[in-house]
Image (cartoon, rainbow, N blue to C red):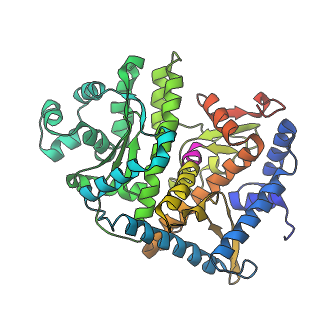
Amino acid sequence: MKKINPYQKLAQILRTDPSYLKDLFEKLEKITGKKKVAFKICQENQLKIFEALKKLNLDPKNVSFSQALDALISKAESDDYLLRKYFNFPKFSSALCWQKVIKKIKSFKILESLNLFEGYFLKEKVFEAILKKAPPRNILKFLGYRKVSSLLKKENLFEILSALRFAEGSKWLNHVFLSEYQKIKKSDFEKREVKIIPLSRKWQKLAKAFIEKKYHNISHLKEAGIIYIIPERGDASGKFLRDFSLIFHYLFEISFYNKLFQNFFKKRNFASLFIKTLKGEDPKPPKKAFEDKILIIQRYYAKEDPYDRRLFLAHINSEVFHWKKAIELLAQIGILLGNLDLAFWKDLGWVGDYFKENSSEALLSFDLIDNVMSLVKEKEGIKYLYHHQEALWNKIFEEFFGKEKLEELVAKNWEKKIIFLSDLTEKGK
């Protein structure tokens, strides 16, 4: 393989400073006793790219950016078609079709041991009381109700809770609705099933701007144990594979946060921690880039600002945990479905590199979600990279600490959202 400077290569992909990255690796190697980790990651990255391109019938030694991208997009398009075919080509605008898809998902035996459909969530009566104290004005007006009591009597509570996200706006949610959580306690939670619900078509108009901002029509409520689907018109290639993957991503995400919430139960500042987590509050970018710390973040900041400074500093993104598990599960589901090779995408989330295109170079992501989202937005010419770059940051720390240990470190340091290198022992603990 071509000899490279691993720090320069990784820094180029991550858009960070090579000397900063080298300093980080040297400190982590001293802590864990592991050596040449940067070289190992680069070598594995090259090998996985080589193998993936071979599977796509391309010559890894003589391939352009556009050739490799077209092949990845075509692979995602083929997988999307075969998945749609298995589910009898469901209509994205039909709640009934989505109900059939959800029923099939819940029937997969492979999910039984993962315990993804149960957790501790706020009781219905708690939500009802909060809605009466903080009336959702936009929803009331949109549906033609004057009182919350009438709304709750005639409408589905879980649809109302889902609609809060796109009907009332983040400012109202963060400063009005979530502030009511200051009063909650452990007894306000109950063990119940995670609900996956397709919303009624009546919500489509209100949800339009939300879908455009989120880039997709599926979201969730961690504290309620809800994954909701907004049926929408259009059948862009890649949409079903994207949405199908998102359902599993959110199942793992709800499970992850549910464990955090149960840990919060033991703390005096439970309500405060609970609210900060739901708001997605992360540490502000430190003023000094060379501080000996690893940030913990729970959002994809590149969606909001591709130059957010936190993206260029050492960090672990919890979102990557959920996507990695979802893709691993998809690989197994593909086997169950027969001729669907979703295993191709397994462990490619962090893989990518620069490829030549005429006289220049461009970064190519081998991540499934980056490629399937690019496929959905193909007409607009939009390309996605941020899932891959965030996964690569996680890969670095996973190499030093291991997958399970990394999640433990994140959970242990969640309250301050920072892991100080000085707190890590020589054994990486």
* Image spot of residue 385 (x, y percent): 58, 62
Q: Residue at x 64, y 37 (%)?
A: 407
* Image spot of residue 224 (x, y percent): 36, 34
Q: Which residues are magenta?
A: 318-322
* Image spot of residue 40 (x, y percent): 81, 56
Q: Tell me where residue 146 sits by quadrant.
A: top left
Q: Tell me where residue 135 sits by quadrant.
A: top left
* Image spot of residue 381 (x, y percent): 48, 74
Number of numbered labels in the structure image: 0
Residue 181 forms part of the magenta stretch:
no
- Rendered position, 190 above or below 290: above
* Left or right of residue 265: residue 134: left
Quick one: 250 or 138, which is closer to the camera? 250
Q: Tell me where residue 165 sits by quadrant.
A: top left
| Placement of the C terminus among the 4 image quadrants | top right
| Placement of the N terminus among the 4 image quadrants | bottom right
* Left or right of residue 82: residue 98: left
Q: Residue furthest top?
A: 268
On the question of residue 362 being in view, the answer is no
Quick one: 155 or 324, which is closer to the camera? 324
On the question of residue 335 being in view, the answer is yes
* Left or right of residue 291: residue 67: left
Q: Residue at x 45, y 46 (%)?
A: 250
